[in-house]
Image (cartoon, helix red, strand yellow):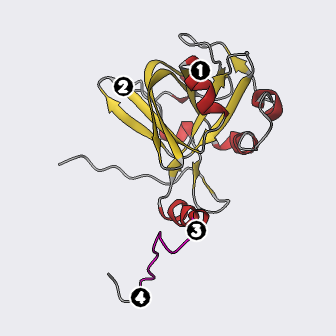
Amino acid sequence: MPSDATSFDPDELDPGAFYRLLTASIVPRPIAWVSTRAADGVLNLAPYSFFTVASTAPPIVQFTSVGHKDSWRNILETGEFVVNIGTESLIEQMNRTSEHVEHGVDEFALAGLTPERSATVAPPRVAEAPVSIECTKHLILDVGNCAVILGAVRHVAVARSILADDGLPDFARLAPPSRLGRSEWGLTPATVEHERP
């Protein structure tokens, strides 16, 4: 360990302080903007920055909910959700949907967003988001104070405006924001290309 390093012991810090240390250290983090529909039909939308691909064959994505929130309950009850990928131009709306509100509040309406019919699942996509990944529940794992939610990918919708010549989303056109530490959000960074050896 470098001589100027500061040590942090998870047994000596309260969980909130250690959470802040981890989220300021593991950066940038992509954001799953998860839309669900409750069993009673109320729409829910919330951003999750603990998000990645879990498997490519079969295609499975995963996100982690710190605590058992509406998204977790809706997926548990209905078995369906959509991971939307937002853009820099949607940061205000993404942040607005992170607000803790009473169960039954429609976050699409709260943030002034448009629900769009999905192709394979009941929860709607965010019409303003250029990428939407429709999923069915594969597995939910309770890990400590969190729930790790894995979704089997059933359909992906990508706006033509962000597709490159090779048919894949172009990173600069997509311009997805990321979460950093504290209240910081990351904007589209510069990129370099390196072929795998």
Query: Which of the two labelled residues, at mark 2 and mark 3, occupies the earlier sequence position?
Result: 3
Q: Position of residue 59 (x, y in %)?
A: 36, 25
Q: Please, which residue is most extreme toward the top here?
A: 119
Span of residues in magenta: 5-14
The residue at which mark 1 appears reads as 77
Q: CA distance from mark 1 to mark 4?
A: 50 Å
Helix, strand or loop at label 4? It is loop
Helix, strand or loop at label 3? It is loop
Check whether the beta carbons of the residues at disc 3 and disc 4 lie within 8 A of each other. Answer: no
Check whether the beta carbons of the residues at disc 1 and disc 2 lie within 8 A of each other. Answer: no
Residue 89 is marked as none
Q: Is residue 20 visible?
A: yes
Residue 4 is marked as 4
Foreground mark, 2 or 3, reads 3
> Is residue 161 or residue 83 the one in the foreground?
83
Residue 14 is marked as 3
Write the residue at 37% across / 35% down: 54
Q: Is residue 65 above or below residue 118?
A: below
The residue at which mark 2 appears reads as 59
Helix, strand or loop at label 1? It is helix
Give neighbour class at mark 1: few <14, some 14-19, many 20+ (Cα, 10 Å): few
Left or right position of 76 against 127: left
Q: CA distance from mark 1 to mark 3?
A: 32 Å
**Amino acid tagged 4:** Asp
> Is residue 180 or residue 107 the one in the foreground?
107
